[in-house]
Amino acid sequence: MTEPKHRPRGTPPASPARSQAETLVRDFNQSLVRMLQARLGSREDAHEVAQEAYARLLNLGDGNAIGFHSAYLFRIAQNLATDRLRRRAHMEQPAEADLALWPDPAVDPERSAGAAQIVERLPALLAELPPRCAEAFRLVRLQQLGYGEAAARLGLTERMVRIHVARALAHCQQRLDEGAGTPAQGREDA
Protein backbone atom coordinates (compact mmCIF):
# COMPACT_ATOMS: atom_id res chain seq x y z
CA MET A 1 0.00 0.00 0.00
CA THR A 2 1.42 3.36 -0.97
CA GLU A 3 0.86 6.58 0.89
CA PRO A 4 -0.93 9.44 -0.79
CA LYS A 5 1.56 11.85 -2.33
CA HIS A 6 -0.23 14.97 -1.10
CA ARG A 7 -0.62 14.60 2.64
CA PRO A 8 -0.93 17.72 4.81
CA ARG A 9 2.14 18.44 6.93
CA GLY A 10 1.99 17.03 10.43
CA THR A 11 -0.62 14.43 9.51
CA PRO A 12 0.50 10.88 10.25
CA PRO A 13 0.16 8.34 7.47
CA ALA A 14 -3.14 6.47 7.50
CA SER A 15 -2.88 3.03 9.02
CA PRO A 16 -4.65 0.11 7.33
CA ALA A 17 -7.03 -0.18 10.30
CA ARG A 18 -7.86 3.51 10.10
CA SER A 19 -8.56 3.40 6.38
CA GLN A 20 -10.72 0.30 6.88
CA ALA A 21 -12.58 2.09 9.68
CA GLU A 22 -13.12 5.12 7.45
CA THR A 23 -14.45 2.82 4.71
CA LEU A 24 -16.77 1.15 7.21
CA VAL A 25 -18.11 4.51 8.40
CA ARG A 26 -18.51 5.79 4.85
CA ASP A 27 -20.28 2.62 3.65
CA PHE A 28 -22.55 1.93 6.63
CA ASN A 29 -23.06 5.14 8.60
CA GLN A 30 -26.25 6.22 6.83
CA SER A 31 -27.98 2.85 7.18
CA LEU A 32 -26.71 2.42 10.76
CA VAL A 33 -28.03 5.82 11.85
CA ARG A 34 -31.32 5.21 10.04
CA MET A 35 -31.78 1.86 11.81
CA LEU A 36 -30.93 3.38 15.19
CA GLN A 37 -33.21 6.37 14.63
CA ALA A 38 -36.12 4.03 13.89
CA ARG A 39 -35.36 2.05 17.03
CA LEU A 40 -34.70 4.98 19.37
CA GLY A 41 -37.06 7.56 17.91
CA SER A 42 -34.41 10.28 18.12
CA ARG A 43 -31.83 11.37 15.54
CA GLU A 44 -29.53 12.73 18.25
CA ASP A 45 -29.62 9.46 20.21
CA ALA A 46 -29.04 7.55 16.98
CA HIS A 47 -25.87 9.55 16.20
CA GLU A 48 -24.58 9.15 19.77
CA VAL A 49 -25.15 5.38 19.77
CA ALA A 50 -23.56 5.05 16.30
CA GLN A 51 -20.44 6.90 17.47
CA GLU A 52 -20.21 4.70 20.55
CA ALA A 53 -20.61 1.58 18.40
CA TYR A 54 -17.76 2.70 16.10
CA ALA A 55 -15.57 3.43 19.11
CA ARG A 56 -16.22 0.00 20.59
CA LEU A 57 -15.51 -1.73 17.30
CA LEU A 58 -12.28 0.21 16.84
CA ASN A 59 -11.21 -0.57 20.41
CA LEU A 60 -11.09 -4.25 19.50
CA GLY A 61 -7.58 -3.47 18.27
CA ASP A 62 -7.68 -6.00 15.44
CA GLY A 63 -7.44 -4.17 12.13
CA ASN A 64 -8.51 -7.29 10.24
CA ALA A 65 -11.68 -7.51 12.33
CA ILE A 66 -12.99 -4.24 10.93
CA GLY A 67 -13.18 -5.56 7.39
CA PHE A 68 -15.60 -8.36 8.14
CA HIS A 69 -17.38 -6.93 11.15
CA SER A 70 -19.98 -4.67 9.60
CA ALA A 71 -22.54 -7.11 11.01
CA TYR A 72 -20.74 -6.91 14.34
CA LEU A 73 -20.99 -3.11 14.19
CA PHE A 74 -24.75 -3.36 13.77
CA ARG A 75 -24.97 -5.87 16.65
CA ILE A 76 -22.98 -3.53 18.91
CA ALA A 77 -25.27 -0.66 17.90
CA GLN A 78 -28.39 -2.76 18.55
CA ASN A 79 -27.12 -3.69 22.02
CA LEU A 80 -26.29 -0.08 22.82
CA ALA A 81 -29.72 1.02 21.61
CA THR A 82 -31.37 -1.62 23.81
CA ASP A 83 -29.36 -0.39 26.80
CA ARG A 84 -30.40 3.18 26.07
CA LEU A 85 -34.08 2.21 25.74
CA ARG A 86 -33.91 0.33 29.05
CA ARG A 87 -32.34 3.33 30.80
CA ARG A 88 -34.94 5.61 29.24
CA ALA A 89 -37.80 3.34 30.35
CA HIS A 90 -36.35 3.17 33.84
CA MET A 91 -35.99 6.93 34.05
CA GLU A 92 -39.54 7.54 32.75
CA GLN A 93 -41.27 5.15 35.17
CA PRO A 94 -43.75 6.88 37.42
CA ALA A 95 -42.83 7.20 41.05
CA GLU A 96 -44.23 4.67 43.49
CA ALA A 97 -47.83 5.30 44.37
CA ASP A 98 -47.80 7.78 47.20
CA LEU A 99 -50.88 7.74 49.38
CA ALA A 100 -50.77 11.53 49.51
CA LEU A 101 -51.52 11.57 45.77
CA TRP A 102 -54.71 9.52 46.14
CA PRO A 103 -57.80 11.53 47.01
CA ASP A 104 -59.34 10.73 50.37
CA PRO A 105 -62.73 9.04 49.84
CA ALA A 106 -64.03 10.76 52.98
CA VAL A 107 -63.68 14.16 51.24
CA ASP A 108 -66.42 13.21 48.75
CA PRO A 109 -69.43 11.85 50.66
CA GLU A 110 -70.91 10.19 47.56
CA ARG A 111 -67.67 8.41 46.80
CA SER A 112 -67.29 7.43 50.44
CA ALA A 113 -70.78 5.92 50.51
CA GLY A 114 -70.08 4.01 47.28
CA ALA A 115 -66.84 2.62 48.69
CA ALA A 116 -68.63 1.56 51.90
CA GLN A 117 -71.28 -0.27 49.85
CA ILE A 118 -68.64 -2.13 47.85
CA VAL A 119 -66.77 -3.16 50.99
CA GLU A 120 -70.08 -4.28 52.53
CA ARG A 121 -70.99 -6.40 49.47
CA LEU A 122 -67.53 -7.87 48.88
CA PRO A 123 -67.84 -10.92 51.20
CA ALA A 124 -71.10 -11.96 49.50
CA LEU A 125 -69.58 -11.47 46.04
CA LEU A 126 -66.52 -13.55 46.96
CA ALA A 127 -68.79 -16.29 48.38
CA GLU A 128 -70.22 -16.73 44.87
CA LEU A 129 -66.78 -17.70 43.54
CA PRO A 130 -65.00 -21.05 43.75
CA PRO A 131 -63.01 -21.25 47.02
CA ARG A 132 -59.51 -21.07 45.47
CA CYS A 133 -60.52 -18.15 43.26
CA ALA A 134 -61.90 -16.22 46.23
CA GLU A 135 -58.88 -17.04 48.39
CA ALA A 136 -56.46 -15.95 45.67
CA PHE A 137 -58.32 -12.63 45.46
CA ARG A 138 -58.23 -12.19 49.26
CA LEU A 139 -54.50 -12.91 49.46
CA VAL A 140 -53.48 -10.66 46.58
CA ARG A 141 -55.98 -7.79 46.77
CA LEU A 142 -56.92 -7.63 50.45
CA GLN A 143 -53.81 -8.94 52.21
CA GLN A 144 -51.62 -7.45 49.46
CA LEU A 145 -49.36 -10.47 49.04
CA GLY A 146 -47.38 -10.88 45.86
CA TYR A 147 -48.60 -13.38 43.27
CA GLY A 148 -45.64 -15.67 44.02
CA GLU A 149 -46.30 -15.73 47.75
CA ALA A 150 -50.03 -16.31 47.21
CA ALA A 151 -49.21 -19.14 44.82
CA ALA A 152 -46.96 -20.77 47.42
CA ARG A 153 -49.68 -20.54 50.08
CA LEU A 154 -52.33 -21.96 47.77
CA GLY A 155 -50.13 -24.61 46.17
CA LEU A 156 -50.78 -23.13 42.71
CA THR A 157 -48.65 -21.65 39.99
CA GLU A 158 -48.24 -17.89 39.89
CA ARG A 159 -50.00 -17.86 36.53
CA MET A 160 -53.02 -19.65 38.00
CA VAL A 161 -53.19 -17.14 40.86
CA ARG A 162 -53.18 -14.30 38.32
CA ILE A 163 -56.03 -16.01 36.44
CA HIS A 164 -58.04 -16.48 39.66
CA VAL A 165 -57.57 -12.83 40.67
CA ALA A 166 -58.58 -11.62 37.20
CA ARG A 167 -61.69 -13.82 37.26
CA ALA A 168 -62.62 -12.58 40.74
CA LEU A 169 -62.19 -8.95 39.68
CA ALA A 170 -64.30 -9.48 36.56
CA HIS A 171 -67.00 -11.25 38.57
CA CYS A 172 -67.12 -8.56 41.26
CA GLN A 173 -67.19 -5.78 38.65
CA GLN A 174 -70.01 -7.48 36.74
CA ARG A 175 -72.08 -8.00 39.89
CA LEU A 176 -71.46 -4.43 41.07
CA ASP A 177 -72.49 -3.10 37.65
CA GLU A 178 -75.66 -5.19 37.80
CA GLY A 179 -76.47 -3.76 41.22
CA ALA A 180 -75.92 -0.17 40.06
CA GLY A 181 -77.84 -0.57 36.81
CA THR A 182 -76.12 -0.32 33.45
CA PRO A 183 -72.92 1.72 33.37
CA ALA A 184 -74.59 4.33 31.16
CA GLN A 185 -77.46 4.85 33.62
CA GLY A 186 -75.06 5.27 36.53
CA ARG A 187 -73.16 7.98 34.66
CA GLU A 188 -76.26 9.95 33.61
CA ASP A 189 -77.19 10.56 37.24
CA ALA A 190 -73.76 11.96 38.08
Image (spheres, rainbow, N blue to C red):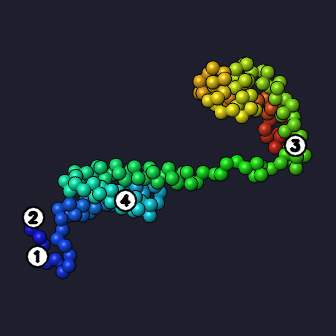
Dot 1 alpha-carbon crowd within 10 angstroms: few under 14, some 14 to 19, many 20 or more: few
Relative image position of residue 123 (x, y in whole percent): 82, 26
Residue type at tag 4: Glu
Q: Which amino acid, by three-letter code, is at mark 1?
A: Lys
Quarter location, residue 48: bottom left
State left or right for residue 3 relative to residue 20: left
* CA gap, disc 3 and disc 1: 87 Å
Tell me how far mark 1 sits from mark 4, CA to CA: 32 Å
Q: Residue 52 got which mark?
A: 4
Q: Earlier in the sequence, mark 3 or mark 1?
A: 1
1 or 4: tag closer to the N-terminus: 1
**Which mark is in front, 3 or 2?**
2
Residue at 81% x, 29% y is 122
Q: Residues within 10 Å of mark 3 (few under 14, many from 20)?
A: few
Q: Amino acid at mark 3?
A: Ser
What element does badge 2 sit on? loop
Distance between the Cα atoms at labels 3 and 2? 84 Å
* Side of 42 where 14 appears, left or right: left
Q: Determine the image quadrant of residue 183.
A: top right
The residue indicated by pointer 1 is 5
The answer to whether 23 appears left or right of 148 in the picture is left
The x, y position of residue 96, in whole percent, is 67, 48
Looking at the image, do the residues carrying marks 1 and 2 touch, with CB atoms under 8 Å apart?
no
**Label 3 close to label 4 by CB (< 8 Å):** no
Q: Which of disc 2 and disc 4 is earlier in sequence?
A: 2
Q: Which mark is residue 1?
A: 2
Residue holding disc 3: 112
Q: Are marks 3 and 1 in contact (CB under 8 Å)?
A: no
- Is residue 42 shown above or below 182? below
Q: Amino acid at mark 2?
A: Met
User: Could one spot residue 187 in this view of the protein?
Assistant: yes
**Mark 3 or 2, nearer chain start:** 2
